[in-house]
Image (tube, rainbow, N blue to C red):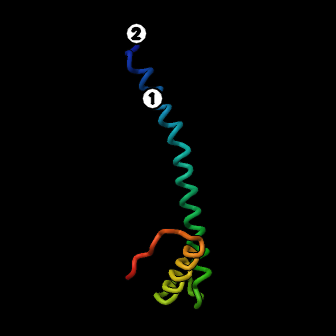
Amino acid sequence: MSRPFGCPIALAFVGALFLTGFPLLCLAAEDGTLFQKRRTELVAKHDKNGDGRLDSAEREQMRLALKEQRLKRGSSFKLPVW
């Protein structure tokens, strides 16, 4: 019984893709949990009325506070003016 020539190469290629892509999937999952944690912290910090949501005034205060932090760090990222 003979094997097709491309089979071992294809399996090696798929295995290499899996091994290189798997850490990226884990990183993406961690990144999502870090995003969720950061979001929860920001809402808790800027939610003045304690309802668990940010109204327009609270969002504006959060936006200004984050902008001030970026300016102190010297970030070149500019927020769009609405």
Q: Residue 30: image x %, image y %?
A: 58, 56
Please report the residue visible at 60 percent of the width from the left and 68 percent of the height from the top.
Answer: 37
**Mark 2: secondary structure:** loop
Measure how far apart labels 2 and 1 are at the Cα level: 20 Å
Q: Nearer the viewer, residue 7 or 1?
A: 7
What residue would you read off at disc 2?
A: 2
Q: Residue 42: image x %, image y %?
A: 58, 76
Residue type at mark 1 is Phe
Up/down of 2 relative to 49, above or below: above
Please report the residue visible at 56 percent of the width from the left and 79 percent of the height from the top.
Answer: 68
Q: Residue 57: image x %, image y %?
A: 49, 90
Quadrant containing the N terminus in the rendered view:
top left
Up/down of 23 relative to 56, above or below: above
Count of all numbered marks drawn on residues in the image: 2
Specify the quadrant of the image occupied by residue 31.
Answer: bottom right
Q: Nearer the viewer, residue 28 or 69?
A: 69
Please report the residue visible at 53 percent of the width from the left and 86 percent of the height from the top.
Answer: 61
**Mark 1: secondary structure:** helix
Check residue 63 in the rendering and tell me which mark sits there, or answer none: none
Residue type at mark 2 is Ser
Q: Nearer the viewer, residue 28 or 79?
A: 79
Q: Residue 11: image x %, image y %?
A: 45, 26
Mark 2 touching mark 1, by CB under 8 A?
no
> Dot 2 surroundings within 10 Å: few (below 14), some, or many (20 or more)?
few
What residue would you read off at disc 1?
A: 13
Specify the quadrant of the image occupied by residue 2.
Answer: top left
Q: Nearer the viewer, mark 2 or mark 1?
A: 1
Up/down of 16 relative to 58, above or below: above
Task: Identify the mark nearer the N-term, 2 or 1.
Answer: 2
